[in-house]
Amino acid sequence: MASAALAQEHLLTVRETLGGIFVGGELSTAVAKAANPVAKPVLYRLLDKPQMKEHCGRIYLLFRYIGDKEDAATMEKRLKAGDVDWGEMNKVLSALSTMQLRGVSEAGAILERMIEPDYWHSTKFAVLTNFPHGVTNELAIYAVFAYARSGKSDWEAKAKSFKGKVRDPKVRTELEWRLDTNRISQHVQEFRHAKVQPVSPEFRKLLSQFFNGDMDNPGPATTIDVPRQPDQAQDGMSAEITVAKTLSPQELASLEVEALNAFQIALNAFLNNRYEQLALTLARGGKPLVPSGSKDDKTIPRALKELKQISAEGGFEFTKRLIKDLNPQATTHGELKGEVLSDGTITIRIPCLGSEPVAHKHLPGQDSPTIDEDGQLNIYMLKQGGQWYWNPFGW
């Protein structure tokens, strides 16, 4: 009885749960873990609101901890009806994966069916042809990763069977790498060991303000800067660094050319392995390898050592393969987004339109600042002390 009462105390209200639609990253997982199942009928209504299209992926993610067998069946029904977009697919797979972990066996059964490329032939995704070996195979690959995350013990046999059915030598060679069991195991371990702090009292006070309560014109009640939680600090980055200001379209317009030029310089150095230049122009995890004003006798050698370690682990070659598929020099760029952080750093994200397939191919299931809510890759640039830094895709 005591544990049930404690769980009820930490359960979010319906409105607070709906507020979770408008947050991402670890905070969205924290909200999902405390989500109120009473909100499910409203979540389904919001999925069909045109104004909520950009948020549908995060709506599906809320079902991770409140979804049951009927919700799993509904997700599959919506997928088959063509109501799920490409950018939402990974979110649906993640929802089903966590639901199976919670004991919703129907979710696991759906994932098992999704591993078969033939499953996707009856969906709208079968008409997409911008993959060398077909989008139905590509979606089935994502399903293998989700199936492995769901705790199913036979995932290795499923991956082996998948590869065994492919006859094209080129596709087979790529699948041997894409579905390498060690790579999938590492992905699963990272998923299982990810720690998410519970919703803090301070953040809970803000949650109810994220949803305006208007079902005809849903959206955030106001623009609110979401505070970082302590566990979001990485590599020594201060947990107190928050978004101080969202840049206006006019401010972004003046920075676009500058940011893209800096990106091309860093990209050229990256493709040609010019480590000394890269040490001063790259960032990782949203933090410059050599922060502005910190170019002393120790920081540059430390940055060079880190770059060479990344290269030795295959990080450079992996990113080069991604860039080859993306061809960022020829990519049409979407509307910029940017913020000024409380430490004065400017962050600029430039969406690469049509890059969803490349993101799904190379970074399946990963949460990265270089992938936006729509599943697109972003050219992610930082400006600190007048110096521009590129944060490579997936770093």
Image (tube, grey):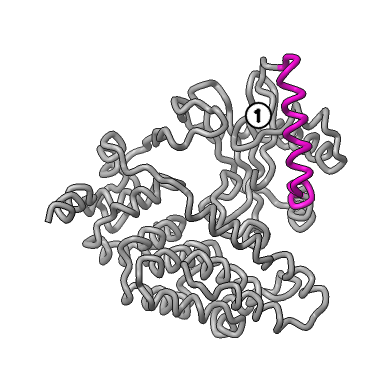
* Image point (72%, 70%), residue name: 175
* Image point (41%, 59%), residue name: 61
Q: How many marks?
A: 1
User: Could you say where residue 80 lies in the image, as x and y percent from the top left?
Assistant: 47, 80
Q: Quadrant of residue 366?
A: bottom right
Identify the residue at the far left of this view: 1
User: Could you say where residue 297 lies in the image, as x and y percent from the top left?
Assistant: 75, 15
User: Magenta region: which residues?
Assistant: 295-319
Judge left or right: residue 195 versus residue 5: right
Q: Residues within 10 Å of mark 1 (few under 14, many from 20)?
A: many
Quarter containing the C terminus: top right
Magenta stretch contains residue 376: no
Quarter containing the N terminus: bottom left
Above or below, comparing residue 204 to residue 106 in the picture: above
In front here: 391 or 298? 298
SS for dot 1: strand
User: Could you say where residue 112 lies in the image, as x and y percent from the top left?
Assistant: 51, 79
Identify the residue at the far front of this view: 153
Q: Amino acid at mark 1?
A: Pro
Magenta stretch contains residue 316: yes
* Image point (68%, 66%), residue name: 180
* Image point (69%, 36%), residue name: 390
Q: What residue did someone put label 1 on?
A: 288
Above or below, comparing residue 257 to residue 100 in the picture: above
